[in-house]
Image: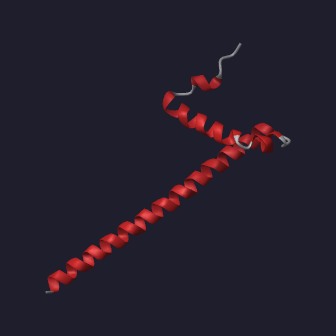
Amino acid sequence: MKNNWRDNVEVYLRKHLELQIRESFKHKEAYENSQNPNTAQLWIAIANLSKEMFEMNLRMKFLEKTIYDLTSKINEETHKKKKK
């Protein structure tokens, strides 16, 4: 009998793998009703990763804008103090 292939995945990657498997399992009804459930499950996992990346990019853009606005304000205040 073959071992569970997931047991052979490196430890640093395994927790991420298990997370994606659990997340895709939430859509089990959808992929089990497809003509090719294995492929559908992979596409669901890809969609989950894409969603995570999109949300992370939104957060990063927000942080970048906040930092830009803050540094602009500090530079403006510093410039005003130098004029006095």
Residue appearing at x 79%, y 42% in the figure: 29
**68 vs 8: above or below:** below
**Most extreme residue toward the left, as rendered?**
84
Q: Is residue 83 left or right of residue 38?
A: left
Q: Nearest the camera: 42 or 18?
A: 18
Q: Residue furthest bottom?
A: 84
Q: Which of the 4 image quadrants contains residue 68?
A: bottom left
Vertical relation: 29 (above or below) 67: above
Report the number of discs: 0
Q: Could you tell me which residue is drawn at 70 percent across and 39 percent down?
A: 25
User: Looking at the rendering, which quadrant does residue 1 occupy?
Assistant: top right
The answer to which of 43 and 67 lies nearer the viewer is 67
* Residue 59 left/right relative to 78: right
The x, y position of residue 40, in whole percent, is: 76, 43
The quarter of the image holding the C terminus is bottom left
- Residue located 30% across and 70% down the image: 71
Q: Quadrant of residue 73?
A: bottom left
Q: Is residue 35 left or right of residue 65?
A: right
Percent coordinates x, y for residue 54 in the rendering: 57, 57
Farthest residue, direction top: 1
Q: Residue at x 48, y 32 (%)?
A: 12
Residue 44, given in percent of the width and then of the height, sits at 70, 46
